[in-house]
Image (cartoon, helix red, strand yellow):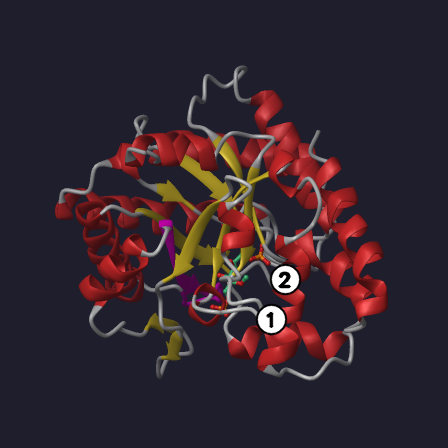
Amino acid sequence: MTLKKIVKKLCDFPKGVLAADEGIGTIKKRFDMIDVENTQENRTEYRKLLFSTPNLEDYISGVITYSETFDQILDDNSRLIDLLLEKNILVGIKLDSGLSDTPDNQKLCNPTENLDEKIKYYVENGASFAKWRALFIISDNTPTKENIEKNAEILADYALKCTQNGLVPIVEPEILLKGNFDSNKIKEVSSFVLKIVFEKLRDCGVDMEEIILKPSFVRQGLDIQVDPQVTAKDTIQNFKSVLPENLGGIAFISGGIKDSEAIETLKLLNKYKDDFNFTVLSSYSFGRALQTRCLQSWKGSVLNLNSAQKKLIEVLSFFK
Ligand code: 5MM
């Protein structure tokens, strides 16, 4: 499949991407909420539950995996990711190596060793796309231009390497929605971050049609209740002025927004797109919004497998 076709398949709303690429530290936070120990066995059981959910392929076009999951072999000697490939669900791989704190309380992407070799390995073993996350924190003085530029250069370098070697890069410049900042602030920060990210992508010569942007919604801080109609319209209006028209697609993060609100916002955004003449394919790459009810139903017990899978499908059905 060409990179452009992969982009189209992944962003074909109401189908979208399940972000199941939590690193060891992040999945621990999710397991802590349901009192499940963060062992490799439990991580495998949980991801097996997700990937073997009946009819998952009716809703999900791709799943982002963590390296441990990608390489996981099951008791019958099959690969865990084969559960997805057999259903014609595309497999993605998290290629970033997490974040470091900067002295001024911002985040900077860590480098990934031997990135070219890793990309080749994942392509040879069935991956179609990748993900790299940068994180920007809103405060009175942040994110700074310097911090955005440094992270954007890393994202652009990763994106170019992926497209040159056969993976669609998902470029994730997440803006942390935690807090009580107002809509003017998020509009200003979102525009500033995306403007610099796309400048750096262009400087590197990345083909915009071959990439997927994974942004946060343009929403006020999570402490504030917001009407999804407002977020949907603000997001389109803001994006229209900064995103290239030939961008391959968008796959939003849920960013800690409640599942029902995140899904409603994306549905409305797709409904309003024509009114604003916004043509970029817009779908999702949600983690928490898709998984929270499923995790709470599973609670680490094989006895709850069916009910947990039903919860996942229940949430996914809200998109239709
Ligand atoms: C699923 O979590 C992803 C990996 O997180 P860590 O690097 O912290 O282990 C994360 O990138 C995720 O894909 C995005 O933040 C979107 O997830 P949400 O839950 O915000 O939709």
Labels 1 & 2 near each other (Cβ < 8 A): yes
Q: Position of residue 269 (x, y in %)?
A: 59, 30
Residue under pointer 1: 44
In reply to whether residue 138 is colored magenta, the answer given is yes
Q: Position of residue 228 (x, y in %)?
A: 69, 37
In reply to whether residue 18 is colored magenta, the answer given is no
Label tally: 2
Is residue 287 visible from the viewing direction of this image? yes
Q: Looking at the image, which residue is at 24% across and 46% down?
A: 166
Region of the chain picked out in magenta, as a range: 127-142
Q: Which mark is residue 221?
A: none
Q: Position of residue 75 (x, y in %)?
A: 58, 71
Image quarter in which the N terminus is found? top left
Residue 180 falls left or right of residue 307: left
Residue under pointer 2: 48
Q: Is residue 40 above or below residue 237?
A: below
Image quarter in which the C terminus is found? top right
Distance in Å between CA atoms under marks 1 and 2 = 6 Å
